[in-house]
Image (tube, rainbow, N blue to C red):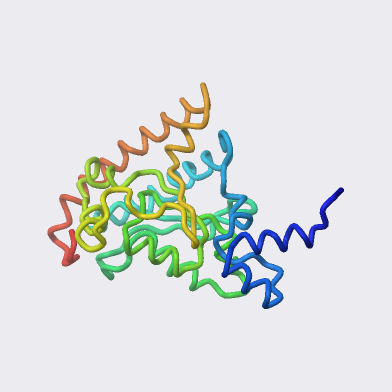
Amino acid sequence: MKEKKADIDRRDFIKMGAVGAAALAAGSTVLPVGSKNQRAWANPKNCNAKLIDRLLEVMENDLVPLTQKEVSKGNKVFGAAILKKSDLSIVVAATNNETENPLWHGEIHAIKQFWEIHREQRPEPKDCIFFATHEPCPLCLSAITWGGFDNFYYLFSHEDSRDSFNIGHDLKILKEVFKHDPGGYARENYYWKSYSLRRLIDECKDKTEESFRLRVNRLQKTYAELSKIYQQNKDDTDIPLK
């Protein structure tokens, strides 16, 4: 017997426990943020080549040029972009601007610019993909949460930031402030789910995987060079955590 949509929707709410039950009792027809169904779009199966290609393209063509401009001023190498889920078009691309304000990490700078867009032109955060060049630090993890995004993707890990780019504050803060070992935060939780672009590439095969890995290797070399420029200029700034 074919199930009615209303019954399926009702069970989806119930599966969420108290939060879902409260939403159902209030007459809501939209699953609460963080629900499995609401995030189904962002659960890539096998090789999501279109998404991987687009995120690498944004990094290569949009974020690298912005970062090249800013590292010479003493800003770090971290950047972020917000894209529409519907067509993968860019809403905002931004990079680190700590020389203006030590809180303007790449992710937060992107979120700031996103919410400065007029309400009528700005998409809902839940309708967007959040992409960070590097795994977000604790400050940016919180900002992504408060910004209303239900996902984020990143290319370089916290360990990459420390070992390849000589910027190790992320892991140190996680350990010193939150007592978490590397990778100790909840990568999937009520608010969002995170995705490592490298792990998504692992799902690809043969020439597709090889092509993506060549692009990642080029990006790693580019960001290593950018990090050297940052290291050379950072002492001329008054950024608290260099």
Residue 98 coordinates in the image, percent (x, y): 27, 64
Quarter-wise, where is residue 217 in the image? top left
- Residue at the extreme bottom of the image, as rendered: 26
- Residue at the extreme left of the image, as rendered: 235
Above or below for 188 versus 202:
below
Rendered-image quadrant of the C terminus: bottom left
- Residue at the extreme right of the image, as rendered: 1
Above or below for 124 versus 119:
above
Residue 141 coordinates in the image, percent (x, y): 38, 61
Q: Nearer the viewer, residue 178 or 59?
A: 178
Residue 216 coordinates in the image, percent (x, y): 40, 35
Q: Residue at x 57, y 69 (%)?
A: 18
Answer with left or right where residue 108 lies relative to residue 58: left
Quarter-wise, where is residue 164 in the image? top left
Answer with left or right where residue 230 lies relative to residue 153: left
Answer with left or right where residue 9 lies relative to residue 193: right
Q: Residue at x 22, y 50 (%)?
A: 167
Residue 17 coordinates in the image, percent (x, y): 58, 65
Quarter-wise, where is residue 118 in the image? bottom right
Q: Residue at x 44, y 65 (%)?
A: 145
Q: Nearer the viewer, residue 131 or 238?
A: 131
